[in-house]
Image: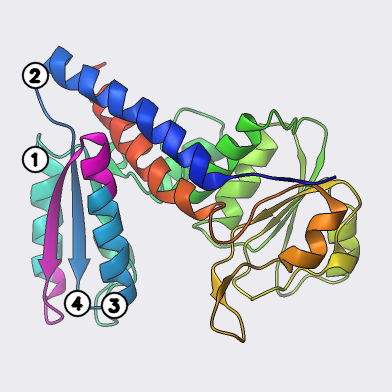
Amino acid sequence: MYKIIDGKKLAANIRSELKKNISEYKSNFNEEIGLAVVMVGNNPASQVYVRNKIKACEEVGIKSYAFYLPEETSQKQLEDLLYSLAEDKKVNGILVQLPLPEKLNAESALKIVPFEKDVDGFSAENVGKLSQNSECLVACTPNGVMKMFESENISLSGKKAVVIGRSDIVGKPMAMLLLNANATVTVCHSKTQNLKEECLSADILVAAVGKAKFVTVDMVKEGAVVIDVGMNRGENGKLCGDVDFENVKKKCSYITPVPGGVGPMTITMLLYNTYITALRSKS
């Protein structure tokens, strides 16, 4: 019998705990915790994400500073703003909403964000520290997945974990976290041969490939834990993940749904990272 890992419920519990901790922080230090969100242009999906992030900040008591820059913003204007936010004591975390308009160099802009304020966990310093299993800010989605394992007491040590997808945002940091938790990790991608066989060997299977219902029931081992990071639209226009949920669930011990699984955890871990940056600035 499978169990659904309810990301919505877990995210609500973490946020409620965060709200208390942030309120305590404010009374102890007599100051706000601030997150700066920078968005360039008018990408509709990005606008929705930014709105959701700002709303989530309000919910837990983080002060958000939103900067909406026009499409024609130059690289220098963007970088000048990031330099000033890097210096601003009121700002504990900085988030640059991606993708940026094509004419802008995201890599160059992101390098300006100090690693202590890099709440997305994308900087070379944070990625390097993660690979060394040192204290760092971890990319929000994989960190959220680790909290899901923790919430269900799913042991990772000695387990065979397969991650499908090697993006810097999910696949690579996910593999590092699983490795740091003593799992034996294989990362699969578009050039992997025998993908089905690799997946069938997995006790823990994380799908982060961005293709609707890519993982089918014949790719999943009996009793596996299946984590679906995908967010796609199916043929009917409905939201669905990378896993064929209805057919795969019968074979799992645990599975995450889409929507309501990993998604709610991502913004929650962004709030968590912002709180952690504030705490560390006091130590």
Precedes in sequence: disc 2 or disc 1? 2
The circle drawn on residue 44 is 3
Q: Which residue was labeled with disc 1? A: 88
Whole-Å distance between the Cαs marked 2 and 1? 17 Å
Residue at (62, 86) in percent of width and height: 235
Q: What residue type is labelled 3?
A: Pro
Which is more N-terminal, label 2 or label 3?
2
Contact, mark 1 vs mark 3 (Cβ under 8 Å): no
Q: In front: 85, or 142?
A: 142
Instruction: Give neighbour class at mark 4: few <14, some 14-19, many 20+ (Cα, 10 Å).
Output: some
Q: Residue 30: give its label.
A: 2
Query: What is the C-alpha distance between the residues marked 3 and 2?
Result: 37 Å
Q: Earlier in the sequence, mark 4 or mark 2?
A: 2
Nearer the observer, disc 2 or disc 1?
2
Mark 1 or mark 3: whose residue is earlier in sequence? 3
Residue 16 drawn above or below residue 242: above
Q: Which of marks 1 and 3 is in front?
A: 3
Q: Would you say residue 183 sits in the magenta stretch?
A: no
- The residue tagged 4 is 41
Residue 65 x %, y %: 12, 50
Real-space Cα separation, disc 4 to disc 3, in angstroms: 9 Å
* Label ID, residue 212: none
Left or right: 135 as drawn, with respect to 209? left
**Quarter of the image containing the N terminus?**
top right
Label 2–label 1 contact, CB within 8 A: no
Mark in front: 4 vs 2: 2
Range of magenta residues:
56-75
- Rendered-image quadrant of the C terminus: top left
